[in-house]
Image: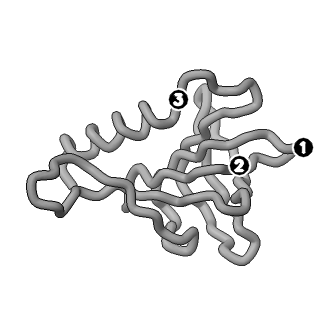
Amino acid sequence: MTVGTLLVLLAIVTVGTFPAGVAADEEPISGTVKSVDSAAQTLTLEVASKGKTRDVVVHMKPGAKVVRFARSTEPGKAGFIEQEVPLSAVKVGWIVSATTKHEGNREVAEQIKIVVER
């Protein structure tokens, strides 16, 4: 993947991560995947903020989607399309962005976007 492609993907994720009218309890969380538990429907992210790192466990909401971006293969259609993948496809070391809501003391994801696959 070229630097230009990565920048385009980052721009797509950034624009899609900050929708207008985000509720007060919603926040996007971006970080490096430390672990994935498909049975429990959770993933643990290492998140950096203000020079410090912390681990955040993200719980998948029933019906939540995990998406990756891929170039369109349709003739005449340029750009990237979203491809839905199972949570089990997410690998340790990848960078993801999760659209989450606070539910009690848990972060519950409605969507996980794969930003960089390493």
Residue drawn at the location 72% of the way across and 57% of the way down:
61
Q: Position of residue 18 (x, y in %)?
A: 52, 29
**For the residues bearing labels 1 and 3, Cβ distance under 8 angstroms:** no
Amino acid at dot 1: Gly
Give the Cα distance between marks 1 and 3: 22 Å
Give the Cα distance between marks 1 and 2: 14 Å
Label 1 vs label 2, nearer the camera: 1
Note whether 99 is above or below 71 in the view shown: above
Residue drawn at the location 71% of the way across and 68% of the way down:
41
User: Is 13 placed left or right of 36 in the picture?
Assistant: left
**For the residues bearing labels 1 and 2, Cβ distance under 8 angstroms:** no
Q: Position of residue 62 (x, y in %)?
A: 72, 62
**Earlier along the polypeptide chain: callout 3 or callout 2?**
3
User: Is 56 placed left or right of 47 in the picture?
Assistant: right
Amino acid at dot 3: Phe
**Figure quadrant of the N terminus:** bottom left
Q: Which residue is mark 1?
A: 104
**Figure quadrant of the C terminus:** bottom left
Q: Which residue is mark 3?
A: 18
Q: Which residue is mark 2?
A: 56
Quick one: 88 or 81, which is closer to the camera?
81
**Earlier along the polypeptide chain: callout 1 or callout 3?**
3
